[in-house]
Structures are given as C-alpha cells and as structure tokens.
Image: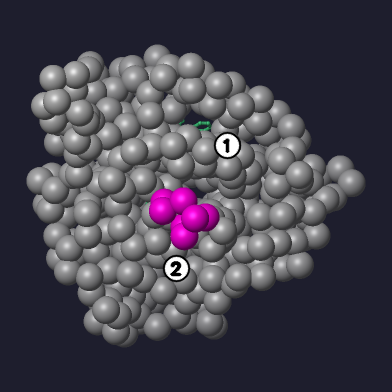
Amino acid sequence: MALQAASLVSFAFLVPKEGKANASFKDSSLFGVSLSDQLNADCSSAALRSKRESNQRVWAVRAEAMATASPAVNRDTAEGKKTLRKGSVVITGASSGLGLATAKALAETGKWHIIMACRDFLKAERAAKSAGIAKENYTIMHLDLASLDSVRQFVDNFRRSGRPLDVLVCNAAVYLPTAKQPTFTAEGFELSVGTNHLGHFLLSRLLLDDLKKSDYPSKRLIIVGSITGNTNTLAGNVPPKANLGDMRGLAGGLNGINSSSMIDGEEFDGAKAYKDSKVCNMLTMQEFHRRFHEEAGITFASLYPGCIATTGLFREHIPLFRLLFPPFQKYITKGFVSEDEAGKRLAQVVSDPSLTKSGVYWSWNKDSASFQNQLSEEASDADKARKVWEISEKLVGLA
Ligand SMILES: NC(=O)c1ccc[n+]([C@@H]2O[C@H](COP(=O)([O-])OP(=O)(O)OC[C@H]3O[C@@H](n4cnc5c(N)ncnc54)[C@H](OP(=O)(O)O)[C@@H]3O)[C@@H](O)[C@H]2O)c1
C-alpha cells in the first residue's frame, strides 16, 4: 500500500507547476493499471487549472447564484392572475454521481421538476430518496442509452406524460478503462461511444422538437463534456489521447466485425473510446448551436464539472485505484471536486440566467467561479463536428 501511495505521490511531481501539457509524458505501469489509466480518469490537476484559468476570461458567476436566480414562467390563469410553473428538466443518468447531485441541487430550489432518465428504476428511486429529493419534485422514467429502441420508447413515454421540456441534460456515461475487449450496445455499436454519444445524439435530436415547443424563458440543451477529451490540457495529453482520425470506424458502424470498434479505425482501447466519445459530445453541442441556436433560441452548452473522483464512473477500475484516487486528487493534485459542488455547477448551467451563452464549454476556477473555457483544436473543429453529425444521423436511423 505504501508503495502504491508512493507511486501516486511520484506522479504528483510529474505535474508541471505551470500546468503546461507535457507531450513527452511517459506511460508506466502502476500495479496492473497503467499510469496513463490513472490520468485517464476524468480529472485534471490543480496546477493545470491555475495557469489556464489565469489566462482566460473569468465569467464571475458564483455557484450560489443559481439557488436564487432560476427563471420562472408567468402564466395567465382563468381569473387573469399570474402564476408560476416549475421548469421541467430531463437529466440522463440521474441515479448516481453528477446527475443525482444536479437533480438534488435543482430540486432544492423548489423551481424545477426533474425527470430522472435512468436505466435502473429501483436504483434511481432509492438514490432520489437517499438524496432527500421530495417526491413532488421528480419523476423517474426508464431510459437505456445503450439501446436506440429504448431511446425512442423514452421519447414516446415522455411525450405521453404531457410534461413540457425546458432543459435536457445529457449526463449519463460509461467508462471502461480496463476492458481488454470491446462490448457493444443493442444495435452493435462499441459501448462507450454507443452510449455516451450515439444514444444521446438520438435522444437530443428527437427531443429538440419538444424543446422548441417550450414556452420557458431560457430553453437549454446541455451535454456533459470532459477535460480528458481536450488535448490542450495536461489530462488530455496523457496516452491514449482522444483522436477521431478520419472516422472510418465510426462510418463503418463501430461493430468490430467489418469495421473497427474505434472511431479512428484502430485497435480497441477502452480509455480512448471514452475520450473519443467525449470529443463527440462536445462537437455535437457545437453543431447543434450552429444549426439551431438562431432559429430555435435554444442555448446549447457543454461543461467540465471538475474531477469528481468519488463517482461510479470509476467503477470498472481495480479496487486499489478506487481507494487511492479520491485522496490522491484531494491532497496531492488538489483537483478534487465533491459531488455536491459538481452538482451545483451543472445546476448553474441548467438554470442560471447569466449562463445563457450558446455554443460554449464551461469550466470553474478554484473559487468555483464559472468561466468560458477553450476546447482543443479537434474538439472545436467545425468540419469534424459536421462529419460526426452526418455519420451519427445515419447510424441512429435519422438519415
Ligand atoms: N467523475 C468525474 O470526474 C467526471 C469528470 C468529468 C466529466 N464527467 C462526466 O460526468 C457525467 C456523469 O458521470 P459521473 O462521474 O457522475 O459517473 P456515474 O456516477 O457513473 O454516473 C453515470 C450515470 O450514467 C448512467 N448510465 C450508464 N450507462 C447508461 C445507459 N446505458 N443508459 C442510461 N444511463 C446510463 C449510470 O446509471 P447506473 O446508475 O444505472 O449505472 C449513472 O447514473 C459523465 O458524462 C462523465 O463523462 C465526470
């Protein structure tokens, strides 16, 4: 154990103080999990943050603002009096981690009804109860993003519920850093990209019409991104780096039979598949912005909520990693963000009236002030965004 801790400590010294990406960073093994796996975990370092943040325009918006500033819709009653209705937000993967913490933060304002779109109904019910979310503030609806039929079914069920859709949060994800072989969705797409990107792509495309119909003052579509998909960061520079290449694997359907299971057409790598899926998430958000922001008045945004080292995202890692990773992030890199804090951050992007800018990627500095962050060259490449969109449309049966 001491040796393992020492290895993590020695990693801390590899993090350059000025936070510059270290292109010559070497991959090495740490008790069955490579050092790059340690870093592939969806986190950055405090050192990285401080330099980047000081170089960027800080949008001085405090987390606590969201608790008081949710917009509310005025509606005429039969008597002509004005009443307020709650905002209606769908959050995918709200049964744990960031999604659950966001549901809790929004429910506590009393201004939102949360539709928890989850694959495990009982788990979601227990999670909502243990988070103390009042019954009248949430509804659980079944959604398995690893099945396009389930996505379509969810959309039908949601429409039948008669609820408006004011905000959609695409939050759910799987991360399979230790997988040696690919696994697949119901339609045969590699699981990470199939769930994190293609499932959300179909969901958000179908629900766009519902968002357009909303009379809420600020309609938003938010897709959770990640620092690890951004190669302009230290975390994003650790091998295997995100790289969509010429997308021959994606165009071939990621099925591992007559095409590669990886977007770039190379050999399967679970950590890279996750990072690639996050690049697709961030590109999709920007393509939505280009195509629909002006016409529909919807805010499209992505974000990196910080390193939430305690969530179920790391469940596929070896137990030793899961034990050491949170204290490592807390005390050594100081990049740790609690689930509660991360939930408040995402809740801000859902409801804060000052975060209505569309086409942007939000991050937070060490004082929890939000700022508009820069995406990597690949994650902001307009041609790639269009290509991801067009191929994804075909794969999910929209073109
Ligand atoms: N943790 C971090 O440090 C970090 C950093 C940056 C970004 N993120 C992003 O934050 C988001 C949430 O991750 P998290 O850290 O909160 O992890 P988490 O606790 O594992 O949450 C992931 C959620 O996704 C759900 N999910 C997985 N596969 C699904 C499927 N096929 N259909 C429907 N739901 C599915 C899970 O459901 P079950 O409960 O049924 O498993 C769970 O509710 C992800 O987009 C992740 O990329 C996380």
* Magenta-colored stretch includes residue 174: no
Q: Is residue 206 above or below residue 297?
A: above
Tell me the SS state at disc 2: helix
CA neighbours of label 2 inside 10 A, class few (<14), some (14 to 19), many (20+): many
Q: Nearer the viewer, mark 2 or mark 1?
A: 1
Q: Left or right of 382: which side holds 267?
A: right
Q: Is residue 87 above or below residue 381?
A: above
Q: Quadrant for ligand 1?
A: top left
Across and down, in percent, residue 182 comes to: 70, 42
In-front residue for pair 371/286: 286
Q: Amino acid at mark 2?
A: Ala
Residue at 79% x, 42% y is 255
Residue at 40% x, 14% y is 122
Tag 2 residue: 235
Q: Is mark 2 within 8 Å of ligand 1?
A: no
Tell me the SS state at disc 1: helix
Q: Which image quadrant is residue 191 in?
A: top right
In-front residue for pair 319/121: 121
Tag 1 residue: 206
Q: Amino acid at mark 1?
A: Leu
